[in-house]
Image (cartoon, grey):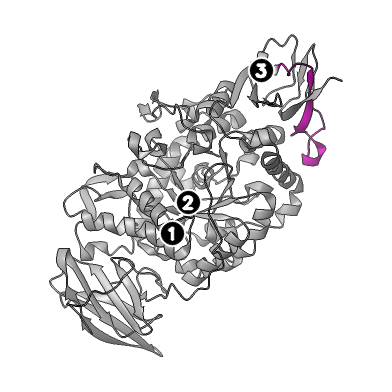
Amino acid sequence: MENHPCVQIQRRYPIGAELIGPNETHFRVWAPKAQHLDLVLEERVANDAKRIFHSLQADEDGYFSGTAGVGAGALYRFRLNDGENFYPDPASRFQPDGPHGSSCVVDPTKFAWSDAEWRGKTMKGQIIYEMHIGTFTKEGTWHAATEQLAELAHIGITVIEMMPVADFPGEFGWGYDGVDFFAPSHLYGTPEDLRAFIDRAHSLGLALILDVVYNHFGPDGNYLGVFSDDYLVREKENEWGNAINFDGPNSGPVREFFITNGRYWIEEFHFDGFRFDATHAIRDQSSEYIIGAVGRAARKAAGSRSIILIAENDLQEAKMARPRYVGGDDLDGMWNDDFHHSAVVALTGRSQAYYGDYRGAPQEFISAAKQGFLYQGQALSWQKALRGTPTFGISPEVFVSFIENHDQIANTGPGERLRFQTSPGRYRAMTALLLLGPWTPLLFQGEEFGASSPFLFFADIGDSSVRDAIRRGRAEWLAPFLSVTEEEARRRLPAPDYPDVFARCKLDFSEREKNRELYELHVDLLKLRREDSRFQQQIRGGIDGAVLGPASFVLRYFSKENDDRLLVVNFGKSQVLEPAPEPLLAPASGCRWETLWTSDSPRYGGTGSAAVATQEQWVLPAECAVALQPVSRK
């Protein structure tokens, strides 16, 4: 072991194993609980493991570091205070055998990137596609997923939001219980495979943003407490366990850990941004909120490349999408659950759990189009608390809207896709609203071709106590949605640790042809949004709306050239407006309205009916969305 106290080692990051020569690696770990700490190098010969111990040098503030003559592929662990147990690196770059196994030295310069001209993406104009690598393909690997990227780019997807990939224990899981935040999951392939996936996406014009979980660590395979008691604040809890120590005593190295993590994914994997999971569960009273700090460090790491930063925030704190100079966190987008909940109520009539705070009424969709969040400080009966803050002045693209995502499909209990819970006509109309609205649309994997595969909660947990706690927690959470007792919910819900539950969630791409009408619906809508300048624009004040009936409304997209667009949506029965005393229905002088697109086209399985707009009356087809454009009366 070589230690050079007088020589400054050039490192990219303050923690982890980094190659500093062809066959030389520098190790650095924060371990304030250790009086002394050993690097344990492992050489595997057949079934035997030879261990070589090297003492690391104590640095300031509880860090230990040192250099060893090993290169990429070397396996190692740490030993604290001459103990009998060996532990993986908290900042491991790869865990070939999972979180309980040895850490592996990785050479990030080995991969030959081809995206030097890639400039990234900004928020405006994007179509997001949420993907879970383990179920996106039958194989469940980055390599297999790479083969599908060209088709996603072809139909108009522009940004892939990858569900968490930080390594976690077991053979399958959603990824939100990750424990090795720097190590891409070994279940999906190698770090090289992930780099190849992203490189290929960039070549097709697709951006990749990573879902990161900075609100808790997973319960199984988390060895951080061995090294320090200061990663967590045990007297503060969120719904997943102890809160992370971002603002308490000795929180400096903890903050450094997460800020470094943000830089790392951007620099070494060329990710194009992040979706920050459940930011409402992060406790941080620091002068600089940790999510804002991570985001700013990530933008700096990206250099001239644009990245996208999106928050999931159940409190709907609009400040997250405001600039720092007005007290905000400099993020680009926020998930809009309000839109989803209204959409589900409009499509299904559900009123259980949090759906009881929504009516699915036309005005809710108009308000969502104009203001984003529906709750901006009003009371919720579901949570018995106030929800949201004002969104005035925030651009429409900030609000990421969806009718399906991983959580919301799973919250049905059986994991049933939304199209099976409503009529085909209403579903087509809602899809049109989603994909033509002024917000940023998000599709969940398979939604674009009407996937029949469910998306259930699945987690392969070996620890029986953790497994039982997860089952109880899911039953408690879902019982109100199913209108049953917790005990009944536990009996009815699929066990999340059963392999067949995971297997059932895998997509079947043959359904692109089997469900061709739904696929064409999505493809055509994405093309219309991309090519029509009115549906493409996302500007404050660029849209207005009016209620036309109990289940119908109109959105008007304004232009300076008297080339407005209308989107008329009717989730109910056929309706005749005679008279039609609504100024938003009036065409420009000398013009009349002509149907540009209708969700009731036979191409999508409809009857072919379309809105009839005359000077005397309007006829709104049942369960239909119609886009109209002005044409000259001449």
Task: Classify mark 1: helix, strand or loop.
Answer: helix
Quadrant for the C terminus in the image: top right
- From the viewer's perspective, tell me whether residue 114 is left or right of residue 226: right
- Amino acid on which the number 2 mark rests in the picture: Ile
Vertical placement of residue 592 versus 1, above or below: above
Element class at badge 2? loop
**Percent x, y for residue 92?**
35, 69
Residue tagged by mark 3?
584
For the point 50% across and 30% down, the residue is: 372
Going by the picture, which residue comes out furthest to the left?
35
Q: Is residue 380 placed above or below 40 in the rendered structure?
A: above
Q: Secondary structure at mark 3?
A: helix
Q: On the image, numbered disc 2 is attached to which residue?
A: 307
Is 626 placed left or right of 465 in the picture? right
Q: Amino acid at mark 3?
A: Leu
Region of the chain picked out in magenta, as a range? 586-610
